[in-house]
Amino acid sequence: MKTKLCFLLLLVTNLAIGQDTTINTANNTTTSTSLGENGFNFEITPTYENTEFSEIGSGFFKEKFIMVSSKKAGGLSKIDHKTGEAYKDLYCLNIDDENGLISRPLSYSRILNTHFSEDQITFSKNEETVYYTRSSHENSLEFKLYKSDLEKDSNGNWINQMALSINQPNVSIETPFTNRAGDKLYFSANYPDSYGGFDLYVSEIKPDGTLGAPKNLGSTVNTAKDEKYPALSLDEKYLFFASKGHKNLGGYDLFRSKLSNRGIRQPRNLGTTINTEQDDIALFFATKNRGYVTSNKPGGVGSYDVYIFINHDVLQSLTGTVSDLETKIKLPNAKLTLRDDDGIEIANTFSAEDGSFKFEVAPFEEYSITTSKAGFITSSVAFTADHTEDKYIYVKDIYLQPTVPIIKDSKIMLENIYFDFDKWNIKEESFVTLNKVVTILNNHPEMKLDIQGHTDNRGSASYNLLLSKRRAASTVKYLEEHGIASDRLQSEGYGETRPVIDCKTNCSEEEHQTNRRIEFLIVK
């Protein structure tokens, strides 16, 4: 079986074999103990197609996996004296849908493969334009960027090969990667304006396939050391890349930065389940949780090997309760909306009977929680998941400020008073509402109220009438118990006879709830 990845053009590697791969001993290095898993959980396994030479992943094309390799492909292979291996060529391999294994490497293209060293490759959205890097024999460690077009109705005949205008003398352009829309090309280069060594850049892809002026991705991502291998997650919310800078274990480590509306966020090391003290590069996803990564870590077959990874989600939860700010009474049925740092809704829920709520969250993400409930001022609070452990539980309690009641048309406009089902016991959450009535009456000692109870139309009319009277009487009792004189209060029940929404026998639950109410009429 072949994995259907025609639409997925993910980044791949461009490590010039023979470049400096010594362990980074600068002050940005850290130990595996202090870094830990860092909120990630990768499972790494070999692909079973590695050789004693270098194999480096290089993207997808028409359901095939593309790989760069320096293995000898016949007696005419020439050896690069700078690397001690053959000049690199591009290969395509089958992908097993079930387990991700790659097999049967074949030369990708007799046109694109030359006696020079081919390296990274990426494709336009329709896979009819290819962007690739190639070195010269004079300097096998300096690459230039080219494009070529797929001849219509041909079986892999690439034509119109051209060097792109962003090439410059003495500048190596490496690791190209196109986004899914096909309008941006990310790459690494050692331009004179870099922060040091190789930086990550992006160029606009014009309608004719040529590129706009390169734009440096900035100092949040780029450091005084080398950054290479840019790639985007399948949902394009995250930029993955390899860096010798930032906080790493040594050599190249893999990092992830969120692409926020506020710009590229601070990179996070992918942790010790994938990074080592050697070079770990070229991470790209084939599916939501599976992909390929290249490393020269100990235990491999050759200089660089391609591995399969499975990214196991690290699941954490955010819990808490919603309460009234003044009385600390727990508030059920409050609506809570969880949003990411771009304000995009991730999930929503309602607080339970005891005011509790729960959301699933991811490590090191920033969120906001918006909470709303009738009779309260809507609240929005920020929250950062700042722990790394799987199944970690954060606690964030939310307190809502009651709104000030409005007096209109001789009525006190309030949210509903809630009772236990088929009973006249006032639920605790409604104490907050009734306390507002107490405050109004205390502030207006001349005011008198007629408290009217209403039900929905379920049940018999006679039963509903009795139930509404009892609920209105319970409301009066609460007010009296909180210091309001009985001669200022009167009550009456009207059952189902005065619905706000006359939906008859076709009422929704929301309409029933609207009709079930206590009204507070000011008696002149």
Image (tube, rainbow, N blue to C red):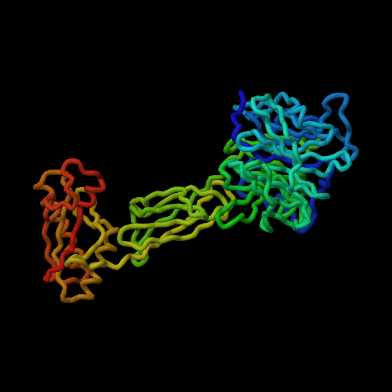
Q: Residue at x 68, y 52 (%)?
A: 35
Q: Does the image show residue 372?
A: yes
Q: Left or right of 423: which side holds 247?
A: right
Q: Nearer the viewer, residue 285 or 417?
A: 285
Residue 182 image offset from top left, x and y in percent: 61, 41
Residue 461 image offset from top left, x and y in percent: 10, 46
Q: Nearer the viewer, residue 211 or 285?
A: 211
Quadrant for the N terminus in the image: top right
Residue 114, by quadrant, is top right
Q: Residue at x 81, y 46 (%)?
A: 21
Q: Is residue 86 above or below residue 218?
A: above
Residue 34 image offset from top left, x and y in percent: 69, 53
Residue 61, by quadrant, is top right
Q: Residue at x 48, y 54 (%)?
A: 343
Q: Does the image show residue 309?
A: no
Q: Residue furthest left?
A: 462
Q: Nearer the viewer, residue 124 or 45?
A: 124
Quadrant for the C terminus in the image: bottom left
Q: Is residue 348 above or below residue 108?
A: below
Q: Residue at x 23, y 71 (%)?
A: 440
Residue 486 image offset from top left, x and y in percent: 13, 69
Q: Nearer the viewer, residue 26 or 173?
A: 173
Q: Left or right of 317: which side holds 405?
A: left
Q: Is residue 348 above or below residue 128?
A: below
